[in-house]
Image (tube, rainbow, N blue to C red):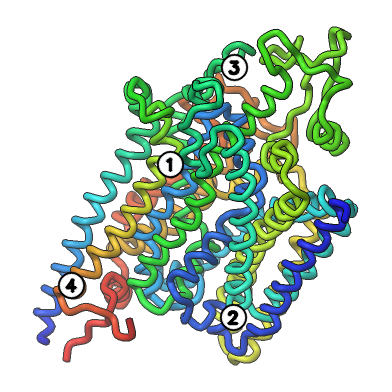
Amino acid sequence: MQPEDLEALRGTYWRENRRWMLILGTVWFLVSLGCGVLWVEPLNDFQLGGFKLGFWFAQQGAIYVFIILIFVYARLMARLEQRLGLEEPGE
Amino acid sequence: MTLTETTYWVVGATFAVYILIAIRSRAGTTQEFYVAGKGIHPVANGMATAADWMSAASFISMAGLIGLSYNGYGGSVFLMGWTGGYVLLAMLIAPYLRKYGKFTVPEFIGDRYYSDTARVVAVICLIICSVTYVIGQMKGIGVAFSRFLETDYETGLFSGMVIVFFYAVLGGMKGITYTQIAQFCVLIFAYTVPAIFISLQLTGQPIPQLGLGSTLADGTYLLQKLDQTLLDLGFQEYTTSVRGSTLNMAAFTASLMIGTAGLPHVIIRFFTVPTVSAARTSAGWALVFIAILYTTAPAVAAMARLNIMQTLQPEPNQHLAIEERPEWFRNWERTGLLGIDDKNGDGHIQYSADPDTNELVMLDNDILVLANPEIAQLPHWVIALVAAGGLAAALSTAAGLLLAISSAISHDLLKRTFMPHISERQELMASRVAMAGAVLGAGYLGLNPPGFAAGTVALAFGLAASSLFPALFLGIFSKRVTREGAILGMLAGLGVTLAYVFQHKGIMFIPGTGFLGDMPPNWFLGIEPNAFGVVGALVNFAVTLAVTYMTAPPPAAVQQLVEEIRVPVSLEPR
């Protein structure tokens, strides 16, 4: 590949990566500092079984969402790397 | 067999496993000693990271912190803070440092900021964070031994040191990784078994995470009952009592999250996996294994608190007679974790939020986890398992921290800064000597805990958040940030955070030397000292960026390095 093509490839990869980080990072913020702290009072008016909803986010829900976020990010990046031919050898 | 004998057998068996692993996984090269040869499977590394991460504090104290000191909802800061950091780690830090592909965190900072000074400043930040953290672990080992095995504190601490010495000095990261996997299995089993039993007993639901939202035998929801009982006793409602203010809770959570993503002993775990994409999935697996404990802990907190209150006060206005208190209650009184004082002399224990009439004068946070199996009347082997689990949690975290400290000394200070000409074999020798020294130093600090040991673990997070995280993040996401910016930023973040903690808690935590007093009215925007790391991080970012734009851009080779670590494979023009 020519140097300028490599530059373009790097640029595309990094731009897409940052876009996913921004989207998933927003979700990360919303479920933890959002639902778990800032909006906990209004959410507590709703019940989820025996939980007040805001309390559930703060002590259970946020953690489950964190796990999903990391695996979604890993999957998205693997797919991006496959599309751009940037997979690592030996996987 | 008596309880102590059973405990000796169970703890002895786990120690035998750790030693066996140590003998089988000796390190032969510096690559094996520092990063376990980069051949650890991502799921295995996730398990090791979980053990590395979950300390004596997570295992023994966290449920009590949530259930008692922080009265329920306020304790959410620990749950979200100590898990949310993994999202930052997986997206912003771990993959790129894995691509960089060397051995330590200060090494990256030194190369990225093209400066020995930056590397040495990073080593100083690392040592301050890790040493404050390791003291707590050494104390945890001594306390766990003395409570469960009825040895004295010194003997307990010494036994723990011998075990760590064995596998950390022989095997380095390789030995530590495999023992941490074994330790994770011990600690997670020890934590969940009593939780399942207590959940079954209270709610009939075997999964504690669901039991927390289920109904009790009388048909009311567990949390509703807990709220009501606490209100009756004059406490705040469990599910809504905020710690300080909303801003304080947000700052506390954010500080723990950012600190998690900046703690070197966690970051270096991701250097041991074979690829960049393995570093990402490994962070996910680490969080899965951590979440097993972290979603169980709030259930243990609520259930054990309710259990204790119902023991003391089975019906409204009916109090437990002192003479009739159960065996476990008497046992834990002897250790000083529980204490009663019959103030009104009626022969009954009145528990309330009012310090003038409250007769349960001592109720230590740790009691919630430690006494849980006895309160639930579980067999001896479960109690023994809790002892082994607490020790596994403390040992695994101590080993990880000691590796971070010793590799910073032998690799960053010796090999990269002061004696660059030593050979691979000499460096391996130096790393073993540094490890041995770190174990002895930590043991000494565990025996003679300095005055500041009390607030240490939370302080470590504040310092990691304010010093190392911004330097790592900007080093990856900006090509423009200069060495002057990073060095001054790290020092400013560290300085501001330490100054804030010291001015409220005393210089080096010596009581009486704090000049603004440990009082909420004097807190900046009502943020408590333990939650200040996020402010320190913002100061670090501001100083770094301001200085950067006053100094010349980094050399082309450094900008090339940043380009290289951002992509998972090396892209050379062909």
Residue at disc 1, secondary structure = helix
Contact between marks 2 and 4 (CB within 8 A): the answer is no
Task: Check disc 2 and report the residue beneath it.
Answer: B33
Marks 3/2 same chain: yes
- Circle 4 marks a residue in which chain? A
How far, Cα to Cα, is label 4 from label 3? 60 Å
Task: Check disc 4 and report the residue beneath it.
Answer: A10
Looking at marks 2 and 1 on the same chain, the residue that comes earlier in the sequence is marked by 2
Give the label, 2 or 4, closer to the camera. Answer: 2
| Above or below: residue B384 compared with residue A10 | above
- Circle 2 marks a residue in which chain? B
**Amino acid found under the numbered disc labelled 4:** Arg
Q: In this orientation, does residue B508 appear?
A: no
How far, Cα to Cα, is label 3 from label 2? 54 Å
Q: Residue at x 49, y 47 (%)?
A: B82
Looking at marks 3 and 2 on the same chain, the residue that comes earlier in the sequence is marked by 2
How far, Cα to Cα, is label 2 from label 4? 33 Å
Residue B254, disc: 1
Q: Quadrant of residue B13?
A: bottom right
Contact between marks 2 and 1 (CB within 8 A): the answer is no
Task: Check disc 3 and report the residue beneath it.
Answer: B229
- Residue B86, x across and y down, in percent: 42, 55
Marks 2/1 same chain: yes
Q: Is residue B442 left or right of residue B80?
A: right
- Residue B573, x across and y down, in percent: 17, 87
- Residue B355, x across and y down, in percent: 73, 14
Residue at disc 2, secondary structure = helix
Contact between marks 3 and 2 (CB within 8 A): the answer is no
**Amino acid found under the numbered disc labelled 2:** Phe
Residue at disc 3, secondary structure = helix
Q: Nearer the viewer, residue B424 or B48?
A: B48
Q: Residues within 10 Å of mark 1 (few under 14, many from 20)?
A: many
